[in-house]
């Protein structure tokens, strides 16, 4: 248990294989306990503060549900912009203040590196719930958990990450996390939204196979997992460029005809237009199960870092 105690969760590439296994095992234990209707009292008397400077549905609610399920309490600012940040307070001062109120902090902020900055400001564990177009490590842990639940393995799989690979923090973190396994990557993006070269380089340096393409139809038949993402409108400087790219890839039921029968379709959500609703009824459509997995995985993280 001690391994993650008092640690921050800032980037997906920070974890050792043992730490990932520990998080997955702990999450499976909590999922089983929830399934049995057990009350888990692991964090009674502890307080989580969530600070969200960007919109969120699943990440904030599942962190809060996780803390409640652990018997802890939550103090929350859903719209951190409405805090003293609006009066010009620095992130440093906000974090120093919250340090006096809580035992663990979950932060979402529009700037890359903001979670690292917050972590330097306090000895409390800081969990990065998304730093701009940077990283979203807790999402990638629940994504990995979902792949394990749906496919029963990770090694040997061909995993297609599709959409806005340039700005999407979920795919940046997921690529880094999956680099701990023997996977084949298919990165499917319009030319303007390719995976940052730095990440592709990191993966190839680890000996992983990475194919970059803009051909979704050609990728479907070889994929074990297809991970769709939203084109990140809020990261575009030019609205016309967003309009040009926003419907680059739309996954329909027909498009999945040539897919393996065992394919798993994932999406961090929110979806705009990337997956047609006629896909929702397919057995491999895992995105709402994926969202639900956020609770046991975040229970695991909260309990491990505050142990
Ligand atoms: C994602 C995010 O905020 O990065 N959502 C999430 O946390 N599940 C994906 C997105 O906004 O497109």
Image: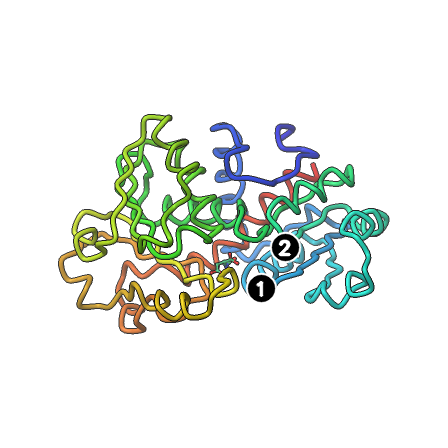
* Residue in view at x 66 percent, y 54 percent: 67
Q: Nearer the viewer, residue 125 or 37?
A: 125
The location of residue 155, given as percent across then percent down, is 31, 34
What label sits on residue 217 in the rendered view?
none
The quadrant in which residue 278 appears is bottom left
The location of residue 277, given as percent across then percent down, is 32, 73
What label sits on residue 56 in the rendered view?
1
The location of residue 17, given as percent across then percent down, is 47, 28
Q: Is mark 2 within 8 Å of ligand 1?
A: yes
* Residue in view at x 46 percent, y 61 percent: 232
Q: Which residue is mark 2?
A: 108
Q: Nearer the viewer, residue 36 or 6?
A: 6
Furthest-bottom residue in this view: 277
271 vs 12: above or below: below
Q: Are marks 2 and 1 in contact (CB under 8 Å)?
A: yes
* Residue in view at x 47 percent, y 49 percent: 142
* Residue at mark 2 to residue at mark 1: CA–CA distance: 9 Å
The quadrant in which residue 39 appears is bottom right
In the picture, the quarter occupied by the N terminus is: top right
In the picture, the quarter occupied by the C terminus is: top right
């Amino acid at each position: 248990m001690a391994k993650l105690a008092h640690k921050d969760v800032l980037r997906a590439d920070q974890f050792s294989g043992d730490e990932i296994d520990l998080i997955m095992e702990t999450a499976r234990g909590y999922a089983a306990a929830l399934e049995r209707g057990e009350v888990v009292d692991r964090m009674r008397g502890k307080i989580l503060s969530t600070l969200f400077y960007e919109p969120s549905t699943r990440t904030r609610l599942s962190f809060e549900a996780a803390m409640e399920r652990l018997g802890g309490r939550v103090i929350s600012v859903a719209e951190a912009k409405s805090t003293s940040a609006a009066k010009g307070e620095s992130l440093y001062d906000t974090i120093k203040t919250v340090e006096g109120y809580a035992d663990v902090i979950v932060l979402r902020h529009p700037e890359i590196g903001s979670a690292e900055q917050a972590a330097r400001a306090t000895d409390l564990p800081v969990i990065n719930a998304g730093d701009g177009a940077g990283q979203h490590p807790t999402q990638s842990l629940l994504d990995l958990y979902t792949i394990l639940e749906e496919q029963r393995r990770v090694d040997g799989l061909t995993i297609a990450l599709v959409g806005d690979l340039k700005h999407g923090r979920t795919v940046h973190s997921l690529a880094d996390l999956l680099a701990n396994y023997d996977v084949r990557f298919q990165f499917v993006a319009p030319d303007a939204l390719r995976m940052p070269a730095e990440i592709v380089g990191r993966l190839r340096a680890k000996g992983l196979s990475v194919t970059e393409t803009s051909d979704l139809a050609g990728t479907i038949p070889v994929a074990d997992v297809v991970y769709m993402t939203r084109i990140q409108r809020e990261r575009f400087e030019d609205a016309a460029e967003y309009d040009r790219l926003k419907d680059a890839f739309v996954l329909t039921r027909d498009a999945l005809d040539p897919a393996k029968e065992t394919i798993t379709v994932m999406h961090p959500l929110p979806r705009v237009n990337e997956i047609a609703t006629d896909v929702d009824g397919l057995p491999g459509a895992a995105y709402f199960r994926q969202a639900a997995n956020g609770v046991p995985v975040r229970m695991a993280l909260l309990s491990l870092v505050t142990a």
